[in-house]
Image (spheres, grey):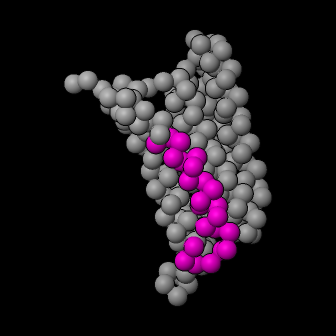
Amino acid sequence: MAITEFQKNLPMRITLSRVFAVPVIVAMMWPNVLPWNIAAAVLFILASITDYYDGYYARKYDAVSNFGKFMDPIADKILVTSVLAMLLSQGKIDAWMVIIILARDNFISGIRSVAAADQIIIAAKPAGKWKTAMQMIAIPIVIIGQLDAYIPYLDKIGYGVLWISVILSITSGIEYYLGYLKSRKA
């Protein structure tokens, strides 16, 4: 079966959809009222799910590219950091959370760049995957905020899960660094 131009470009379009969703999500969060927060949380969840599908279709249609490998984590970072910045400005999360998450992401990007220059591939670590999963669960909950009449302590649950992702950020950062050091010795 011949792969069409549409199929070849689909993974990159899906990746870029995450980036294009960011201003819409941030705009929905701006009024910080429940209906808009729910809409922003739903759009964040949908954008997060695209992270699976861009890779799936890239492999399915043999459309894996270096640009796609580069853009996929960048799109994730744009989505997560933009929303974290809004949550910080709304006072829903702590500055330390954002600092640690951003520092870890920049640290890992640096390690990956150095590893690539050394022609070393560092496989994704379980703590990093769990960190991402915890963020994708926690962030929409924190966006929604208080729903005490319906789900008591929802905002506190989201906040706690986000702190778990922060701890996993530190853990995975250490794992990546140790993995790089181990790969250099091999």
Q: Residue at x 56, y 53 (%)?
A: 21
Residue projecting furthest to the left: 1
Q: Position of residue 125 (x, y in %)?
A: 53, 35
Residue 18 lies in magenta, yes or no?
Answer: yes
Q: In this picture, is 141 found above or below 11?
A: below
Q: In this picture, is 124 found above or below 52?
A: above
For this rendering, which residue is in front, 185 or 111? 111
Q: Position of residue 142 (x, y in %)?
A: 60, 67
Task: Specify start and end residues of the magenta stretch as a single range.
Answer: 14-36
In the image: residue 109, left or right of residue 34? right
For this rendering, which residue is in front, 88 or 183? 88
Q: Residue at x 42, y 43 (%)?
A: 52
Q: Position of residue 109 (x, y in %)?
A: 67, 32
Quadrant of the frame with the C terminus: top right
Q: Residue at x 48, y 24 (%)?
A: 65
Count of labels shown? 0
In the image: residue 66, left or right of residue 181? left
**Quick check: can you spot residue 161?**
no
Q: Residue at x 40, y 42 (%)?
A: 53
From the image, give the main secondary structure of the stretch colored magenta. helix
Residue 46 lies in magenta, yes or no?
Answer: no
**Quick check: can you spot residue 31?**
yes
